[in-house]
Amino acid sequence: AEAFVRSDTAFREELIAHQKSKRIIQKDWHPGCTAVTALIVRNKLFVANAGDCRAILSRAGKPFPVTRDHVASCPKERERVIKEGAEVRWQIDTWRVGAAALQVTRSIGDDDLKPAVTALPEITETDLTADDEFLGHG
């Protein structure tokens, strides 16, 4: 979890440095990205996810999701974001966060929506079995 938060801080610091070096004055430019990473320790699969990236394990030839999307349409995520003080509203076809109308509720960057849109990932732990073949993520 700490690596995601550190990446978020570094991303935002680098963006500010880039803007200053190029003399960019663009107040409403707040790029961001989502992230997923996996680690296997013995027979355990740990997956950290922030945003709408996905990790899916192939178990006995069938998809076995090990992440869930962090989006404003998820009631639990929407409630968390609202508690952090961000505006969430229905727009076009789904729930969205802030003036940027962001769908994701966790990301690296998107500094205009911090702390509500957090870089803190959700971490899952899955016991691996002989039926597990590979992990796809992106």
Image (tube, helix red, strand yellow):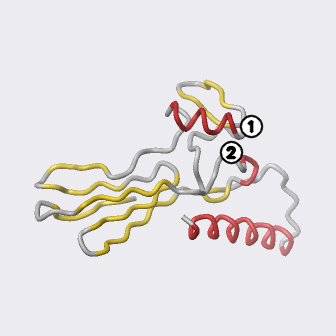
According to the picture, the residue beneath numbered tag 2 turns out to be 116
Q: Residue at x 88, y 68 (%)?
A: 23
**Secondary structure type for disc 2:** loop
**Disc 1, SS:** loop
The type of residue carrying mark 1 is Gly
78 up-or-down from 137: above or below: above
Occupied quadrant, residue 103: top right
**Residue bearing mark 1:** 85
Which of the 4 quarters of the picture holds residue 88? top right
**Quadrant location, the N terminus:** bottom right
- Mark 1 burial class by Cα count in 10 Å: few <14, some 14-19, many 20+: few
Q: Quadrant of the C terminus?
A: bottom left
Percent across and percent down for residue 38 are 38, 67
Task: Identify the residue shown where x is 69% and y is 71%.
Answer: 10
Tell me the tag on residue 6: none
Give coordinates of residue 48: x percent, y percent: 45, 60
Residue at image point 58% right, 44% down: 105
Nearest to the observer: residue 135 or residue 41 = 41
Under mark 2, the amino acid is Ala
Q: Is residue 131 above or below residue 3?
A: above
Horizontal and vertical percent position of residue 43? 23, 70
Instruction: Please give the count of numbered marks on the rendered protein.
Output: 2
Give residue 135's position: percent from left, percent from top: 27, 62
Left or right of 34: which side holds 27?
Answer: right
Q: Are marks 2 and 1 in contact (CB under 8 Å)?
A: yes
